[in-house]
Structure formats: structure tokens, C-alpha cells
């Protein structure tokens, strides 16, 4: 039996309500074989138990492991050659990204996330990232293998689409509007990611069989987004999730074009369509939800469907600002995600929490603004729920798994911080990913003094550099050429959409 005491200056064990968290000063967490036995004062626990090890010297802030509840890749699209544009044209230029080995790429982001205090991630994997010469299964397996090697918890899913894959219109209809040779080249590429509903469910079942026994892994299902999926596919996924007792992750109303697609196609929002299909429910988490209506917010609350809010991504891809305050006021379960890349083009979850904390501060004395405690809850407990690790992590309490992060408080406190400042406020106002010193998952130390214990960071960096030092392949060159030729046609397509004036959730600058 392996046991340890995780020692702190302060332990934040859990968020109690919107304005308070439970904090134990000079506190500690005692764990045996990864299970938390007791949380209390260090002196008391030290006298009561004989741990194999004491982690931390009593100067750190200890918090529950953070959950990044929406994530796709390691090296960011910007690193790989595509600048930020509005979401729809960006989806086109993103295909210009270089191919990266899935295992190395995932190790890279796992290291970055652990360094930022993220212990659990919702990894949504694209079908176009299938392994060279291999198939979808190998590609997914390589991603999960990397998380296993790094030691993180992961809810993994393959994001799939079976319609409207070039723009938000039937593939053949759209391709008929562009030059014939370009359309042919795009068709050839679409074949590569083609999968029937049965094949997709079989892929999920195969990966569940191979990885589902690992207590740090959940395998999810993921229809890419409502406009990208036929009703038949959505219904089959819902049914399979029920049969296997697993979660479903989907993008939803990320841009106003996506909302408009719903109004044009069904005369209602995509979420209303999902509700009418019987798709919504507590096992479903929706990434983004920027363009949701008041009626959508009621649907989310009534059905227990969760939203993974991605503030940085929504700013970078000109998507807008999700209505967090109305969602929280209505009791919608919201988690936080960094998506492809945060505001710093990295995985600094503390910075992402700060952005969320600030961006929803509506003007006016009586206008709502999320508290630091609420934001911490989104990044811990709610993220744990969305990834189906809710019974295991998200708080530091007896009976849960010991996923804890030790934050160096020097930068936060020095040279001076008011003695009455709440510790959770201090973390949200002044903390940064680089302040994370030590990370524990299941009682196991994955990083200590910013040194990774399981994987060799410099080797991973070197291997990635080597991998990307090769010449562009023919397939990469072809993708770049096709994307450059396709972009003006896609821009023209969306440019013709009539943007109606609707009710907006946030009245940021519309008061006077
Ligand atoms: Zn996404």
C-alpha cells in the first residue's frame, strides 16, 4: 500500500456556494493507494497516520486537479500554420496544418496540461487525424496511450460528421458551385474520413474494449456538431450511449451561422432540434453554446444537458461570448475548456479561468458577474461531471481519488498581499499556470518541482522537432493548395447569409 500526506499552507477542498469555498489552513490530504482517507490539519493527520511520503513543504496552495472539458490537439493550429479567422473560414485553413504524430502530439499537450495543473481532459479527436497507413482505431489508441503514459485522466471521443462537410450545405450541392477540378480534389479527401454509422459505433466499441478498463479513461461518443450530423446518426449515437452507459460530447451553436442553419433548416435552433429528437440529457455535454437563446437555456437546465464554455477560443475565432451569466442563473451545468488553444496559445487553465472570471463582468452596479468560487467550480466539479469522473474527482474529500495540484504562492503573495484576501480570489486574480509546482493524480506524483516524473519533456520536444523537420509531404502540399483555392468560395457562401437582428443575451455596450 502506498500512502502520502499532501501538505499545504491552505487546502481548497471544495466550493461550497457561489460566494464561499471550504479552506483548511495549514491543511493536508491523507491518501492511501490513490483514495483520499481524510482531509484536515497537517499536524493532526501527521500524528494519526504514518504515510510513506509527505508531498509539499507546507508553503503551497493545494487545489483539486483542474479539468479541461473541451480539447482537441497538442501543437496549436497557429503553430502549425493557420492564423485565427472567423470559425467557418478557419475550418478551411486549418486543414493546411501539418500532420503531427498523434502519440507525440498528445504527449506534448499532456505535459503542458499537467504543468498548468490540469489532471483531467475531454479529448475530442478528429477523424482526419487518422494514423498514416493505419486506421481510426490506431489513431485513437495512440492518443489514449499517450495519456496513459503521462498519467492524466481522459474522456476520449472521436468527433464524426456525416453531412455538410465542406460548408453548412449538402456536400454535392455546395461542390456543384465551385470549379470542377477543385470539387474533385475535395471529394477525394472526403472519402478518407467517410464512415458509416455502424462503423463509427464499432470504432467506439473497439476503443472501449481496449481502454475502457483503465480507471483513468472514459471512452465517449461524439457527433461533431448538429449541422454536420444526420438525424439517423444522432439517434444511433444517443442509443449507443445509453446502451454503454457513457457520455456524448458535441459542438453546439458555436457561431451564429450554426444557429442560422437551424432556423433555415428546421425553423428552430439546433438545440431545439436535438431536444425534439430526444437527444438532450445529463450524459450530453455541448461545447461552446455561444449562440443559444433563452429558450435553449431553459432546455439545457430542464434536461440536465451540460455546456463546456470556451472563452479564449470564442474570442480567437470571432465566435462571440457565450451567455454564462444567464446559464448560471438558470442552473445550467457549465464546465470550462481551452479548445484548440487558449488566449496565450497554450494550455494555461488558470489563465482561462481568469478570462472567464473577467469577461462576464457585465457593466453596472447591479449587473451579474461570476465569482471566483463559481469559476473554480466550473473548472473542477463541473468539469468532472462532464467527463464522467464526477464520483471520483473535482473536490478533495474523503472517498474521492487524490487528484491535487500544489501551487507556489510566491508570485501570488509577494511582496505583499492583503491578509484578508480570500485564497480563491488570490488564485483567480494573480495565479498563473507557471505557478503550479507539483501535480498528483490518483495519489501518484506526475510532476514535482515542475519536473515531470513519468515522461521526459526534453525528449518529447526533441522528437516533435525531428518529426516536423522533414519536408512537406505530397498530401500536406495538396491540402494547402486545396485550402487556399477553396477559401474564397467558402467566404462567398457565408457572405450571402442574411444575418437577422435577434435578441442578444449580453447587452454589454447596448445600455445607453
Ligand atoms: Zn472544439
Image (tube, rainbow, N blue to C red):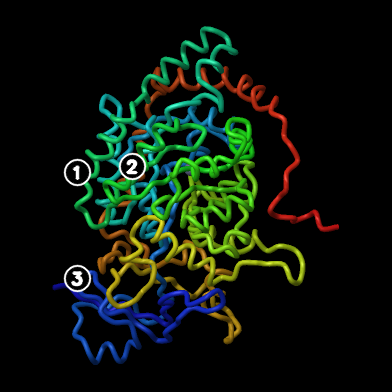
Give the x, y percent position of residue 425.
56, 74
* Neighbourhood count class around disc 3 (C-alpha, 10 Å): few under 14, some 14–19, many 20 upward: some
Identify the residue at horizontal 41%, vertical 15% (top origin): 188
| Residue 42 visible (yes or no) | yes
Give the x, y percent position of residue 95.
48, 28
Secondary element under disc 1, as helix, strand or loop, is: helix
Q: Quadrant of residue 92?
A: top right
The label shown at residue 239 is: 2
The label shown at residue 210 is: 1
Residues under labels 1 and 2: Cα distance? Answer: 21 Å
Identify the residue at horizontal 25%, vertical 34% (top origin): 202
Q: Quadrant of the N terminus?
A: bottom left
Q: Quadrant of residue 266?
A: top right
Give the total number of marks visible in the rendering. 3
Mark with earlier residue (1, 3): 3
Give the x, y percent position of residue 16.
48, 77
For disc 2, does the CB lie below 8 Å from ligand 1? no
Amino acid at each position: 500500500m502506498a500512502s502520502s500526506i499532501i501538505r499545504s499552507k491552505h487546502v481548497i477542498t471544495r466550493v461550497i456556494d457561489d460566494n464561499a469555498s471550504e479552506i483548511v489552513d495549514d491543511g493536508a490530504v491523507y491518501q492511501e493507494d490513490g483514495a483520499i482517507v481524510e482531509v484536515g490539519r497537517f499536524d493532526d493527520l501527521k500524528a494519526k497516520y504514518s504515510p510513506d511520503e509527505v508531498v509539499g513543504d507546507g508553503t503551497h496552495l493545494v487545489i483539486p486537479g483542474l479539468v479541461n472539458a473541451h480539447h482537441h490537439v497538442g501543437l496549436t493550429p497557429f503553430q502549425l500554420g493557420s492564423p485565427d479567422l472567423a470559425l467557418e473560414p478557419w475550418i478551411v485553413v486549418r486543414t493546411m496544418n501539418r500532420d503531427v504524430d498523434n502519440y507525440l502530439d498528445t504527449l506534448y499537450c499532456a505535459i503542458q496540461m499537467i504543468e498548468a495543473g490540469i489532471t483531467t481532459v475531454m479529448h475530442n479527436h478528429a477523424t482526419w487525424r487518422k494514423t498514416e497507413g493505419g486506421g481510426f482505431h490506431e489513431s485513437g489508441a495512440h492518443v489514449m496511450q499517450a495519456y496513459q503514459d503521462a498519467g492524466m485522466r481522459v474522456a476520449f471521443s472521436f468527433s464524426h460528421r456525416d453531412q455538410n462537410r465542406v460548408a453548412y450545405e449538402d456536400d454535392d450541392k455546395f461542390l456543384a458551385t465551385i470549379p470542377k477540378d477543385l470539387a474533385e480534389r475535395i471529394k477525394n479527401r472526403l472519402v478518407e474520413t467517410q464512415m458509416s454509422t455502424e462503423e463509427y459505433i464499432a470504432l467506439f466499441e473497439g476503443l472501449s474494449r481496449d481502454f475502457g478498463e483503465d480507471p483513468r479513461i472514459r471512452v465517449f461518443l461524439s457527433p461533431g456538431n448538429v449541422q454536420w450530423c444526420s438525424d439517423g446518426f444522432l439517434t444511433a449515437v444517443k442509443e449507443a450511449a445509453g446502451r454503454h452507459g457513457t457520455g456524448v460530447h458535441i459542438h453546439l451553436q458555436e457561431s451564429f451561422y450554426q444557429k442560422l442553419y437551424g432556423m433555415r433548416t428546421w425553423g428552430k435552433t439546433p438545440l431545439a432540434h436535438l431536444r425534439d429528437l430526444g437527444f438532450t440529457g445529463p450524459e450530453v455535454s455541448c461545447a461552446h453554446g455561444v449562440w443559444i437563446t433563452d429558450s435553449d437555456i431553459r432546455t439545457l437546465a430542464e434536461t440536465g444537458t451540460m455546456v463546456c464554455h470556451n472563452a479564449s477560443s470564442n474570442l480567437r475565432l470571432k465566435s462571440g461570448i457565450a451567455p454564462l451569466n444567464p446559464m448560471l442563473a438558470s442552473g445550467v451545468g457549465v464546465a470550462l475548456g481551452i479548445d484548440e488553444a487558449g488566449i496565450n496559445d497554450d494550455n494555461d487553465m488558470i489563465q482561462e479561468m481568469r478570462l472567464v472570471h473577467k469577461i462576464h463582468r457585465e457593466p453596472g452596479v447591479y449587473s451579474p458577474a461570476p465569482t471566483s468560487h463559481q469559476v473554480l467550480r466550473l473548472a473542477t466539479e463541473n468539469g468532472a461531471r462532464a467527463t464522467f469522473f464526477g464520483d471520483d474527482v473535482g473536490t478533495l474529500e474523503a472517498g474521492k481519488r487524490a487528484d491535487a495540484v500544489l501551487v507556489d504562492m510566491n508570485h501570488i503573495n509577494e511582496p505583499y498581499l492583503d491578509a484578508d484576501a480570500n485564497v480563491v480570489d488570490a488564485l483567480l486574480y494573480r495565479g498563473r499556470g507557471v505557478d503550479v509546482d507539483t501535480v498528483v493524480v490518483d495519489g501518484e506524483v506526475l510532476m514535482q518541482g515542475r519536473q515531470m516524473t513519468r515522461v521526459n519533456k526534453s525528449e518529447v520536444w526533441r522528437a516533435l522537432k525531428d518529426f516536423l523537420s522533414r519536408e512537406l509531404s505530397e498530401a500536406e502540399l495538396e491540402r494547402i493548395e486545396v485550402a487556399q483555392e477553396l477559401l474564397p468560395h467558402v467566404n462567398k457562401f457565408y457572405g450571402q447569409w442574411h444575418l437577422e437582428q435577434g435578441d442578444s443575451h449580453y447587452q454589454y455596450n447596448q445600455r445607453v
